[in-house]
Image: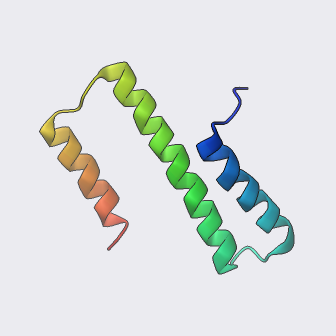
């Protein structure tokens, strides 16, 4: 298994440490898990763009809509 990047390793460690001592619905734990998911998503997007090249405007808009839906 590949070693996680520093951007992923830190939030993974924070979420792991908090999960040992906090209830599953603890706001700080939930925020740490969200931060980890965001970093993992960002790295995945970077890998896909490197493999496939730049996205079209329509593809970028579609992804922006999906990400914005989470804010609603």
Q: Residue furthest front?
A: 6
Q: Is residue 62 left or right of residue 40?
A: left
Give coordinates of residue 61: x percent, y percent.
18, 48
Give coordinates of residue 18: x percent, y percent.
78, 67
- Residue 7: quadrant of the picture: top right
Give coordinates of residue 27: x percent, y percent.
64, 79
Residue drawn at 35 percent across, 29 percent down:
49
Residue drawn at 73 percent across, 26 percent down:
1
User: Is residue 57 placed above or below 12 in the rendered structure?
Assistant: above
Residue drawn at 68 percent across, 78 percent down:
25
User: Is residue 27 placed above or below 40 in the rendered structure?
Assistant: below
Front residue of this view, candidates 51 and 69: 51
User: Is residue 72 placed above or below 65 in the rendered structure?
Assistant: below
Q: Is residue 67 left or right of residue 59?
A: right
Give coordinates of residue 51: x percent, y percent.
38, 20
Colour mode of the rendering: rainbow
- Residue 19: quadrant of the picture: bottom right
Q: Is residue 63 left or right of residue 8?
A: left
Residue drawn at 22 percent across, 48 percent down:
62
Quadrant that contains the C terminus: bottom left
């Amino acid at each position: 298994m590949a070693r996680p990047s520093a951007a992923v390793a830190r939030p993974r460690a924070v979420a792991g440490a908090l999960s040992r001592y906090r209830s599953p619905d603890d706001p700080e734990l939930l925020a740490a898990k969200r931060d980890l998911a965001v970093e993992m998503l960002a790295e995945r997007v970077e890998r896909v763009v490197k493999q496939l090249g730049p996205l079209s405007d329509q593809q970028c808009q579609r992804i922006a809509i999906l990400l914005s839906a989470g804010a609603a």
